[in-house]
Amino acid sequence: MEEKKLPPIEKIAEAYSVIADKRIKQTDMDVFMVSSSNGEKEYKVTVKGNYYRSNDSATKFARYPGYPVLAVLMVQHLIPVPENLLPYLEKINWNEINKKYKRDYAKALDAALAEKGISEDTINAIKGAMKNTYNKFIELGIKV
């Protein structure tokens, strides 16, 4: 039996940014289009029951649900979105910051939040919300 791969928890913050920036559109009952943070790419997420397919690198090659899939789950109200914290995650160029930190997603998240001048309390609230969303995601048991 193949072991289920989980995304890095920091991908939850990237999915929050998708929602905050309104970079997701439903084009059909089971099809969603998600734009990248720098606007250079658009990912197609197709849903069939408990299976989520996407052409983003994480989902397609690393075999864990990437941020486009996580954003779709949020739009479907299957995992929670902290609406009050979304403004802090607007307009972050994740592509650029992830490259700068060589895909060390924890460092990239910390740098993105620090760059925005967010208070320690708010950073803790965001990370607490991420843990809650991540735990709900794990409970879903979706497949890619």
Image (cartoon, helix red, strand yellow):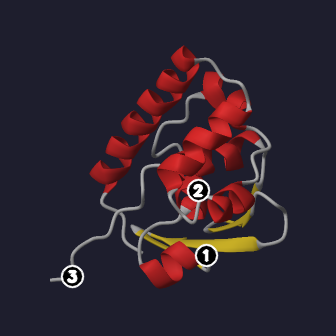
The kind of residue on which mark 1 rests is Asp
* 76 is higher (above) or lower (below) than 133: below
* 63 is higher (above) or lower (below) than 92: below
Q: Which mark is residue 72?
A: 2
* 71 is higher (above) or lower (below) than 142: above
Instruction: State which quarter of the image contains the N terminus.
Output: bottom left
Q: Nearer the viewer's eye, disc 2 or disc 3?
A: 3
Q: Which of marks 1 and 3 is nearer the N terminus?
A: 3
In the image, residue 109 lies at what x, y percent?
A: 57, 44
- The residue carrying pointer 1 sits among few (fewer than 14), some (14 to 19) or many (20 or more) residues within 10 Å by Cα, namely many
Q: Name the residue under label 1.
A: 56
**Callout 1 secondary element:** loop
Q: Earlier in the sequence, mark 2 or mark 1?
A: 1
Tell me the CA gap for discs 2 and 1: 13 Å
Q: In this view, does 107 lie to the left or right of 2?
A: right
Query: Which residue occupies 82% across, 60% down?
Result: 38
User: Residue farthest to the left?
Assistant: 1
- The residue carrying pointer 3 sits among few (fewer than 14), some (14 to 19) or many (20 or more) residues within 10 Å by Cα, namely few
Q: In this view, does 125 lie to the left or right of 25?
A: left
Give the quadrant of residue 88.
top right
Residue toward you, 90 or 116? 116
Q: Are marks 1 and 3 in contact (CB under 8 Å)?
A: no
Residue 76 in sight here: no
Query: Which residue occupies 69% across, 50% down?
Result: 18
Q: Are marks 2 and 1 in contact (CB under 8 Å)?
A: no
Q: Which mark is residue 2?
A: 3
Residue toward you, 104 or 20? 104
